[in-house]
Amino acid sequence: MGFFVHISCLLISLICIGDAQRITDKMFCNIAGTSCFRRLNATHSTGCSSTFRGSQGVVHVIKTMEDFEFLLNSPPSPPYAPIIPPKLFTRENMLRLKNASNVISGVVLTGTLKNLNSFSHESRCPNQYGGLLREQTCSVDDAENSWNPFGTGLLQEDFPFPIFLVSSEKDAAKITDCFEKFNNFDMESQNLRSLCSIEINAFMSAAVNSQVCMRRSNMQNNLSPTNFCDPLQGRNVFATLFPRKIVDTRQVDPTEEFIVLSARMDTTSMFDGVGPGAMGSLVPYTVLMQAAQLLAKILPEKRDASNLNVLFVLFNGEAFDYIGSQRFIYDLQRGEFPFKNNQRNPIALENIKFLVDLGVMDTMRILNLFHATDFPAAANFGQIMQKYSSKFGMNVTTVNKMQGNLPPTSAQSFLKENINFPAVVLNSPPTNRFYHSIFDDDDNINFVYGNTSKNFLTLEDLSAPSADFTADSIQMSIRNISSIVAFSLYEMVTGEVYPDPLGGSAVFADEFLHCFLTTSQCPLFSAIVGDNSTLPPFPPPRYISIHRTGNQRSVVYCHGIFGLTVGQKLEGVAKENCTVPPLYWYPGYGWHGECHLTTTNVSMAISPAFKEDNYNWTSGRYSTWTESTWNSISARIYLRPSTHHEALTLAIGLTVMVLSFVTVFVINTKSDVLFGISPSSEVISIPARC
């Protein structure tokens, strides 16, 4: 009998739980999307956060500038959560909402690129306080002479409410329909009726600045250890053109010389997980990878006994005061690059004879060659580039510019250590209208996947027109610039003019962009990953993030592409004999399998500020960016009752409670009359012993 009772109770409990879930589903409608989040540095915090229990506000759709006036002039039923299209998501409007945080509990961003001239949350002077000299940086008040003339600086603002991004048109329509049905009429008497509202959960644990947050996180508390923020960190990826000698004792070899070709591999935006960075960083990233692949093809081994090598470096975290390049230089100065277990001699700054840093390439026909001081290699490199552009009819103009106001690229970290460091920056005039934003995607660079199914590792005849891509396509532009850079480095290394017509492949550029902008399930990634089932159907995120996230997939893919394209293919080596680095086995194009002797590796990309025990947080010496921790990000809409309804419900509840107490008291005192039970006054006697 007891068994059946337990089963009955269990079934009743399950039914109650199911009913409760169905009631919740009827009350709330989940909205898919993501939110901005909080980042901190040594002086302040940026981003946004909801309250601990989530921020609730009445939905109000903004369509014109006049709609803001309703919210900012004593609205009848605060707090509100305005729904804003991208064209009205401007600095002026957002700061007005920030100053009215007493009536604004959150902001929802919806919509598309329609009628959108620009949308960049970054400052007009990116990394303004992390570069060479503060007085040499551009001015945010002078848009025409800045490095990001379309920047709004919202990425550096701290908002007291959450900002939620809804990319799905279906979910955006749900919010709009709810607003039209319950809110968009008789506006002045909204407080007298139930209103469509939204709840945004995006609470950020960190506050104040990085120093305070890290101190709180490092407090020893064994009962409930809490992490409030983490340093931004990732990995730099590098490879050398020629293999370096394995040594027993590591020490700097002053005769070893390097030409460094560098670019950034990361990007960022205001919202978590959304930031393609197509024009902002992926184009120069692709140029470097293709130049490395081409140079390894045309110069597979040293031509003479010189000790000159080419070092390809992709820096991570450059969007946040040059995290990757700062750590790279920090390790060079201490003999810690590459890692000690690398069994190669450490490299010092003095070993680098020339640095070519690839900046933004918004305008692919005009490339400015910036350098802080005048030195022979700078002018020579520009002349060589122009020569090969003319030779192959690529119509790429290289302009030599020596000035103190340099583009915000990794070269700033080197010049900060030594103003006379032999560095040049290859940078086009800034025309990217969506720099560091959610709209810097494939459409911004007019990328259309060719899907040629051709071998992307073969070289192309530059003297013949392409059968797959038009001359003005992004694939051809990347092919041309990477070929010019590779030919110029070839001449600087060998001292000889490159004689052949073979150059970079537009198919390689096509596949590379496809993998990083569309999907990871692509031919290029399949050629470096043994199990295709591990490739997700979305492109790898390139935001540096923190060590506990999956954003390091882009580092793994970059490492593999370097190994496949720059590493030396070893014929006749079986897979079982190709398992110990630097030997790596790759499926290769066509999945036939091949063993490569690689020169690729990774290094730390975390600011030295978090390595030094007594770092002076006010010095500005190193990047100090951290990221707040959070539990979850979500949003849902529901119908919020009116103030009168809530007051009536409370009054009825209190009345029922008082009446219940009175009723129970009366029944308890009159129980003998009501139930016919007389109280017993006799003492129960203890049974006598037998």
Image (cartoon, rainbow, N blue to C red):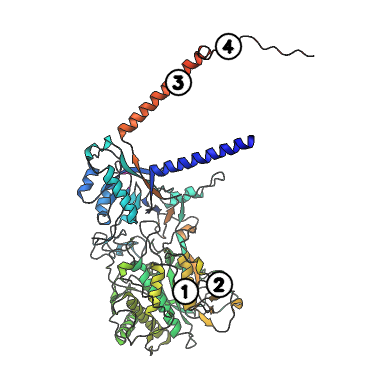
**Camera-side residue of 184 and 107:** 184
Q: Say whether disc 2 or disc 4 marks the residue closer to the N-terminus.
A: 2
Say whether residue 354 is visible.
no
Task: Work out whether residue 176 can be spotted.
Answer: yes
Tell me the residue that label 3 is attached to: 661
Marks 3/4: CA distance? Answer: 23 Å
Q: Distance between the residues labelled 1 and 4?
A: 91 Å
Report how far apart the C-alphas of labels 2 and 3 lie in the structure: 79 Å
Work out whether 105 lies above or below 434: above
The amino acid at mark 4 is: Pro
Residue furthest to the right in view is 690
Q: Is residue 354 above or below residue 209?
A: below
- Tell me the CA gap for discs 2 and 1: 20 Å
Report if residue 90 lies within the magenta region: no
Give the distance between the C-alpha atoms of the residues marked 1 and 3, in whole angstroms.
76 Å
Query: In the image, what residue type sits under mark 3?
Result: Phe
SS assignment at label 2: helix
Tell me which numbered mark, 1 or 3, is placed earlier along the sequence. 1
Residue at far left of view:
66
Q: Which of marks 2 and 3 is nearer the N terminus?
A: 2
Q: Which of marks 1 and 4 is nearer the N terminus?
A: 1
| Type of the residue with mark 2 | Asn
**Residue position for label 2:** 342
The quarter holding residue 415 reads bottom left
The residue beneath circle 1 is 561
The magenta stretch is 99-106
Quadrant of the rendering where the C terminus is positioned = top right
Sequence-first tag of 3 and 4: 3
How much space separates mark 2 and mark 4, taking CA atoms? Answer: 92 Å
- Label 1: how many Cα within 10 Å (few below 14, some 14–19, many 20+): many
> Mark 4 — residue?
679
